[in-house]
Amino acid sequence: MARKEIVVEEVQKLMDTLENVRNVAIVAHVDHGKTTLTDSLVARAGLINKELAGAQRWTDFDEQEQQRGITIKSANISLGFNYDGKDYLINLIDTPGHVDFGFHVVRAMRAVDGVCLVIDAVEGVMPQTETNLRQALKERAKPVLFINKIDRLINELQLDAKAMQDKFVKIITQVNKIIEANAPEDKKKDWVIGVEKGNVAFGTAYNKWAISITSMRKFNITFKDIYEKCAQEDHKYLVERSPLDEVLLEMIIKHLPAPSVAQVYRIPVLWKDGDLQSEEAKGMLTCDSKAKAIGVCFGVVHDEHAGEVAVVRVFSGTIEKGTELYVSSKKKYAKTQQVGVYMGPDRVAAERISAGNIGALVGMKDVYVGETISADPMPAFELIKHYSEPVITKSIEVKEQKDLPKLIEALRGISKEDPTIRVSLNQDTGEHLVSGNGELHLEIIEYKIKNEKKIPILTSPPIVLYRETLIGKAGPIEGKSPNKHNRLKFTVEPLEAHILKAIEEGEIKEGRPKGREVWEKLVELGMDRDEARNIYDIYNGCMLINSTKGIQYLNEIEELVVQGFEEAMDQGPLAKEKVTGVKVKLVDATLHEDNVHRGPAQMIPTVKRPIYAGMLYGGTTLLEPKQKVLINTLQEYSGDVINLTNGRRGVLEGMEQEGENAAITTLLPVAEMFGFSNDLRGATQGRAIWYQEYAGYHTVPRDLVTKIVKQIRERKGEKAEPPTPEFFMEA
């Protein structure tokens, strides 16, 4: 029998001993050593040779990951271990650190109960470290900390033992600050980390050794021993005395919760729309494998033989081959054709996936990431909300028309696997517009289409996605239907910034408000109660409110008013970019008594035109995406770096100096970042490392708006000059 089949048999047995199951994600900033660390656990489970651990980077099995030396997508692996005479099952997810693939980290958090946060001892807490830890705490995943590459502090930075310990204290303090700000109130005391608690370990993943307070006592090894052997580069001695897999395993098992413990406090947060007194809730809160099957899909893998494979965390019940499951968004049942567990690149068939575990389901067609699947219809889990937005677009078209169906299928599969990608069709040119989080993100998609799907394509240079927003108020403005039988009056005004923030952060859900929870929350945020109770729709961070009283037939055209509003918010009047942060109020209406005269062709223009005219009267401007960029370089180059970023409209946010090094933080528009890497290399003679993270949309400087609007309109085949309000009022 093959080794993997033996492993699956072991995994299957261990699934049911819930107190011995751990669901864990390894998270970190890019290049801090997650995948190298994961190797040691994979080797301990017997899937790779221990000698190769650290160098093999086994969970980076994708060809692009191997070429680029970074993790691009999460890898799931279920491993059986014997520790202290007991058998344990660890469902492990190795996540990416690069900002462009942050969504893989976000969705992994839904599946796990704990995270092992990895931090490079030299670089310390970086932007992505903070983002990932905040996301883990938001999803109620408990953290432990591994400080990696500590040999660099001795051999590269030449730090003495005291300076080294000071560095550790600084990292631990920064991590605890994030935990204290984001952990649940009743868990803060338990979740903060400390060397004396045993939930912090130090070591070097590449050299396969580590220490924690527990291992120092257990293996009778001191910090002095570590320092001396590390300075002598005698890693073999340290591996024999205090092996990494032993230290890591002890920390995960002792300090991260079993599913039956974690689901008690996670379910009320992840399932806010559910009734916690219901039968479903009881099954999930007790992690009962005999209850009704309920789970959340947190990954979709496109398999050329099996089709779409849903990677699922099961919260209650048991799923096996032939189980009928209700797919929440599709409002229909699907039957599982096969269940399995992931061993990195391979999906190996299993008999069942029981409550508290992670597995793969074949046969769940058309599921998406965040999908709720259950034995019976039930309220869905909270949407998995990503913190960044697609900011760059490329147009993709086939070289030969016969390949068009293949391209459509490929894009459909890729956008299922990665929901942060937006794909739309330009009706006029027939090109597919693909939007992603950054240049690297789009490069990977292009590579997949050309090399993996073997489709010859042509692509445009990357284009930045802008947004339109409102500066002032306008209205009431009346729109007449083309047949002159219907009139609608609207006012427009900017949506309050704190309400827009609550929508962007997922506190207030987009769509048609259901129940009183939405308007109660808005009233809490300071919105007028009447307005909050009469919201028709929340879309793209914009709001449509019915402020009319007693208008006859209005309920019959409500759907068309919402449709017209959404179409207007998808393509603004200035440059046909998405609109955000606008509050639209319907304040009056005169409608024909016969519904034949109130069809879509009559009502949709009657909604869009006055909204557009109002926005232009009120004053419309552009918002552009920005990145927060952290640049580490030598002090002597810091002036050149600041000149370079200033020349690209950068806003200096901070500068720290430590010895010869300088850390410069700046806010840069995405539009100014093309070619930035090469220019930075030139300015610092290659002596700079830089990282970026999404920093939201910001107002474009007034003197640039006209120029950018003109460029966008010409690119879209529109007249260079934007329309006037009067253009939309000419019925």
Image (spheres, rainbow, N blue to C red):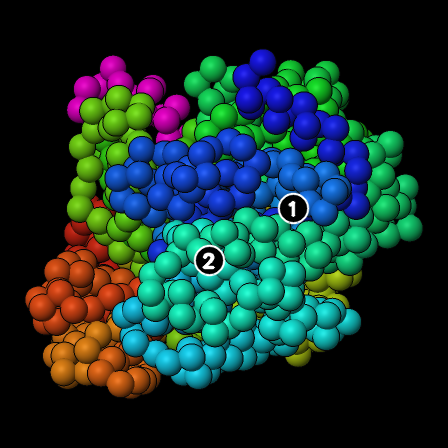
Q: Are marks 1 and 2 in contact (CB under 8 Å)?
A: no
What secondary structure is the stretch in magenta mostly built from? helix
Residue closer to the observer: 496 or 677 = 677
- Residue depth check, mark 1 versus mark 2: number of the one nearer the observer: 2
Q: Amino acid at mark 1?
A: Asn
- Residue found at x 25% / y 27%: 451
Q: Position of residue 601 (x, y in %)?
A: 47, 39
Q: Number of callouts in the render?
A: 2
Mark 1: secondary structure: strand
User: Quarter holding the N terminus?
Assistant: top right
Residue 183 position within the rendered picture, expressed as x and y whole percent measured from the top left: 66, 69
**Left or right for 146, reference 376:** left
Residue name at image x 83 percent, y 34 percent = 289
Residue found 22% across the figure and 49% down from its top: 462
Residue under label 1, please give it: 23
Q: Which residues are magenta?
A: 399-412
Instruction: Say above or below: 553 vs 655.
Output: above
